[in-house]
Every structure is written in C-alpha cells, then in structure tokens.
C-alpha cells in the first residue's frame, strides 16, 4: 500500500517517515496494511495494524507497546475524541493523532522477600498513599509505615508525589519496599557504640501480623502544608491503632464519633467522625432514618457535610492577631481544637454490611484533637464561666451562624494550679448553613452575654472580612455553595455592624435567633425586605448592598 496508509502518532515524524530506507530499518515495508509509529520518551516503536481494525484495536496495539491503560486512553483527532468504531478520519500522507494518557500510573512493588505487587495509582498521589495501598493489597505484609520505598536505591519520602517519579518517561515504576533500619547510639565507656537494627520480612518472622488500618490526611490543595500539630495528631492516632488500641465509640450525640487512643491506651488523642455515620447518613450507628432529601438534622445543612464544616470552623478560627496564614500552630481566637480531614480504615467503626480490608471500607471524616476536660457547660453553673471566653465563643457562633450551640458542646477544662476555667467549643458540623432558620445559641441566656465586649474583642471583630474567609475556605478545598456564602456574608455583616454600635452578644444574637420555632428572626425579616428591594436579575453584590441598607435602618431603631 502507499504511504497514505501510514498513521503517525507525532507530527514530527512526517519528514522522518518519508526519509529513504527509514521504514526498512524495522523490518517493515509500505505494503503492510497500516503502520503506527509511537514516540514517547525519545523512543520509536512501529506496529502493524490491519485496515479492518477498530480504534479499540489500535488502543490495544499501543498498550502492547508501552503498557498504557486502554480504559483511560483517548485518541484525539482535530480536538475530537475518536469513537471506538471510528473510521474515515482523513487522508494524505500522514494522519496526526494525539494520545491523551491516563492519570493512572502503573507501579510494580517488590519486597525483599521476593513478593511482587502491581498497583495502579493516580499520579497526583504520594509515596505514603502507595504504602497504604500496599497494606490493603497485601494483607500478610507487616506494617508498611515501618518500611521504606526505594527507587533505584534512593529512599523515597512519604510526601514525594508519584508524578515526580515519572520524569524519566517510564510508564511502570519499579519500587522496592524494605524494612527501615533503626540506628541506636549507646555509650560504652568513653566511646559510642552504634547499632543498626533492621526488621525482618514476614516470611522470617512468625510474629508478624497483617495490618488492617490506615489514617491519611485528605489533601485537596497541595499548596497547603499541614501544621506540625496536625501531623503529630495523625501520627499519634496511627501509633495508637498500631498498638492495638482501637476506636472507642462515643455514647453521646446522634452521629458516629470515635475516641482514638494513644499507644499506651490510657488516654485519648483525637476524635474521628466519619461522614457516612453522621445523623441521617446511610451508616449512622444509632439507627436514625436516612434523610430523604439530603437535608441534615438542622435546617440549611446537608447530610455528609458535617466533617468539612468542622474543618471550616477550625480554619476560620484564626488567632487574635487576625492572621489568616495557614498552617499555623497558634491557638485560635475561640479555641476550636485543631481539626483536619482524614481517611481512616479500621474494623472498629460501624460497618453494617460486614468488614474487610478493602477500599470500600475506608471512611472519610473529620479528625479533631481531643481536649482533656472535667465536663461540659451543661454539668456546672454557667455563672462561673469567664466572660471573655463566653464572648469569644459568641463571636465564633455568630460569624458562622451556628445552628447547634448548646452547653453540651462546650468543654470545660481547668488549667494550672489554681484550676482556672477554660472553655473549648466543639461540634461545628452545623455551622455556615444556607439559611438562618435553626440558629441556636444557648449562651444567649447566660449573664455574660449581656456584658460589653472588651476593646480587644472589638478589634478582632473589626478585622473580620467575609470575602477573605470565603477565599480561605475555597483554598482549603470547600467549594462552598452560594447560599452558604450569602449567610456567611450577612452574619459577619451583622456582627460587625452590631459590635460597632456597642451592642452586646445578647443583642446581636437575639437578632439572629428565632424566639419560637414558627416566628421568623429579625435577620430573616431583614433578608425578606432586601429581597423585595431588588429584582430577580440583581447580582449578589447588589443584594448584599440592599441587606446592608435594611440592616442599618433596623439597628438605628
């Protein structure tokens, strides 16, 4: 046949293919039905394809060359993906096609004991994720976190991205997993004796047991580095599970919450709340009926979004300095415990359909630092609570339009020899709703709420910026719905305007909360009046401006 039947997968090949004697170098000739030339990483490999072959068969031929993934391949001609049975795409000497490669990366892992695994991992994952997949795929392996992965003799850091390992153009990464060496230095007289202890493979250690656990941060934005205290939190949680100290289910609350233990098993280090065990979620451990329309227990919230709201409360509770930089290791303004999103696998969680070490049983949820306490605000008289701490929690709740603030989710701790009281707000799964209907603040009825804010707190309120807060949440991976951003803008506006006019937490909170279930709050009425002032085609900026005008009139009364 003629050169018109030659298909090149790179435009740069046109002159090369036409060069005299080029095709003959590969033992081929132009009488072959169709020739495909695939170029990648500088190599060239021709393949024969029959004229009657389909696009699917072409993909198979390409896969046989370089091990690409057929299910993920796309052959593109003039910006259009070619169908599996496509034909008649063009004529001429060469047909230029583009291969859009899969996001998956083939990884071959070999242990020092000779066992081999093949994994398909997204290129955006890191080495630590590969270790966890090894734990899931090879149940008989010892804990991979005690091992190191090496590539060409180089130890790979757990945070190293898979895509960084592909720069040499190879489509299969060959890794070796081996037990990490522990170096110990012991004084011997005037000298130092250094010993290196290397663990053995499971085939030579009858005590080795399979691991069925993992705790991994959910990384949405790789520009964000977890603060050291969150890294330590995850590490302590993993160590506790590795020592056999499983999750302890909390008897409080309507959702699944688990106390995670330290290695000694004598204290708690964190609290894990899986999204699939939230109230009205599919695997709720308390037998609650599943939400029909997706709405959560509180109006304006969605089932399965509690974890991201828990994290949002921590992210927005930036320190008194007003700094929105993250990561930070400073205590937040209201003292929300450090919180992050994680993936967690353990048999101790609620698995109504049975448990096995498999990706299907990996749970995603919020992991929050456990706070030692002597009880909650429900357990003691509210008159002993420090005014400034009640005020700080009030600022947080009104900013976030919290729909679930009661005495049971404010922890009471005693610090120092004098036992000074410290309040810690927890359970923020119902903050930043898309409506104000269920806003509830129990502190509204405490005497501290009727006292004036201090200059320090007023300065903090003045520094608040809802637009920057929304940007910060998006930076952390929450594509916050427009209805929720509206609530955040309005709640922050009310707090700032009210504080500037000298209103107390009681006065501002009373505008935001309903007196009864059926009587709308003042803030809801303000929103209705603003909606009546603007047309349906108005922008969000115009609507917020209308809300501001109505709010000013209301506060001046």
Image (cartoon, rainbow, N blue to C red):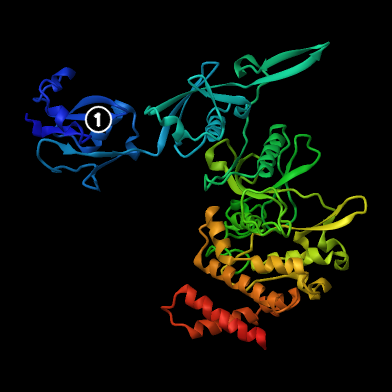
Residue 304 at x, y = what percent? 57, 56
Residue situated in front as seen by the camera: 26 or 63: 26
Provide the residue designation for mark 1. 38
Residue situated in front as seen by the camera: 367 or 292: 367
Residue farthest along the right direction in this orientation: 418
Q: Reply above or below: 267 against 531.
A: above
Q: At 42% across and 31% down in the image, what residue appears? A: 166
**In the image, is 149 to the left or to the right of 405?**
left
Residue 28 at x, y = what percent? 14, 21
Number of marks: 1
Q: Reply above or below: 270 against 172.
A: below
Q: Reply above or below: 142 against 286.
A: above
Residue situated in front as seen by the camera: 311 or 267: 311
Within-10-Å neighbours for mark 1: few <14, some 14–19, many 20+:
many
Q: Quadrant of residue 3?
A: top left
Q: At 58% across and 64% down in the image, what residue appears? A: 301
Residue 509 can be seen, yes or no: yes
Which element carries disc 1, helix, strand or loop? strand
Q: In which quarter of the image is residue 287?
A: bottom right
Q: In which quarter of the image is residue 509?
A: bottom right
**In the image, is 4 to the left or to the right of 508?**
left
């Amino acid at each position: 046949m003629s050169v018109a039947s030659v298909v090149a997968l790179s435009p740069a090949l046109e002159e090369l293919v036409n060069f005299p004697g080029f095709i003959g170098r590969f033992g081929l000739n132009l009488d072959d039905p169709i020739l495909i030339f695939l170029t990648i990483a500088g190599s060239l490999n021709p393949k024969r394809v029959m004229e009657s072959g389909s696009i699917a068969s072409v993909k198979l031929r390409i896969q046989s060359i370089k091990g690409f993934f057929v299910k993920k391949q796309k052959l593109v001609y003039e910006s259009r993906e070619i169908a599996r049975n496509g034909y008649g795409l063009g004529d001429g000497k060469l047909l230029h096609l583009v291969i859009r490669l899969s996001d998956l990366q083939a990884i071959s892992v070999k242990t020092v004991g000779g066992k081999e695994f093949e994994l398909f991992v997204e290129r955006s994952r890191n080495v630590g994720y590969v270790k966890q997949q090894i734990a899931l795929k090879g149940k008989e392996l010892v804990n991979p976190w005690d091992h190191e992965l090496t590539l060409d003799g180089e130890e790979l850091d757990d945070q190293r991205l898979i895509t960084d390992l592909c720069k040499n153009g190879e489509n299969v990464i060959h890794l070796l997993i081996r037990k990490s060496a522990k170096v110990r230095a012991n004084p011997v007289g005037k000298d130092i004796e250094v010993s290196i202890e290397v663990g053995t493979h499971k085939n030579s250690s009858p005590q080795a047991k399979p691991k069925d656990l993992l705790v991994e941060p959910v990384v949405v934005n790789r520009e964000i580095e977890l603060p050291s205290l969150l890294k330590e939190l995850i590490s302590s949680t993993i160590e506790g599970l590795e020592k056999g100290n499983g999750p302890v289910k909390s008897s409080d609350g309507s959702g699944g919450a688990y106390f995670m233990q330290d290695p000694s098993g004598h204290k708690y280090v964190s609290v894990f709340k899986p999204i699939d065990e939230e109230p009205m979620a599919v695997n709720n451990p308390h037998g609650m009926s599943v939400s029909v329309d997706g709405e959560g227990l509180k109006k304006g919230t969605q089932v399965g979004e509690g974890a991201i709201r828990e994290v949002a409360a921590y992210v927005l509770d930036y320190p008194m300095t007003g700094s929105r930089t993250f990561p930070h290791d400073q205590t937040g303004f209201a003292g929300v415990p450090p919180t992050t999103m994680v993936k967690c696998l353990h048999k101790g969680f609620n698995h109504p359909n049975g448990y096995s070490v498999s990706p299907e049983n990996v749970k995603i949820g919020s992991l929050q630092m456990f706070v030692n306490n002597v009880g909650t605000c429900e357990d003691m008289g509210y008159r002993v609570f420090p005014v400034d701490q009640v005020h700080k929690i009030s600022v947080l709740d009104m900013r976030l339009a919290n729909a679930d603030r009661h005495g049971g989710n404010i922890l009471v701790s005693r610090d120092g020899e004098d036992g000074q009281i410290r309040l810690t707000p927890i359970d923020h799964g119902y903050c930043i709703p898309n409506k104000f209907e269920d806003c509830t603040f129990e502190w509204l009825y405490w005497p501290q709420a009727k006292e004036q804010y201090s200059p320090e707190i007023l300065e903090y309120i003045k520094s608040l910026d809802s637009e920057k807060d929304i940007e910060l949440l998006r930076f952390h991976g929450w594509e916050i719905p427009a209805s929720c951003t509206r609530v955040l803008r309005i709640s922050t506006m009310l707090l700032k305007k009210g504080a500037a006019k000298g209103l107390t937490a009681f006065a501002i909170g009373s505008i935001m909360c309903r007196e009864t279930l059926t009587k709308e709050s003042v803030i809801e009425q303000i929103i209705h009046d603003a909606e009546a002032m603007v047309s349906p085609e108005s922008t969000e900026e115009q609507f917020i401006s209308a809300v501001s005008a109505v709010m000013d009139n209301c506060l001046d009364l």
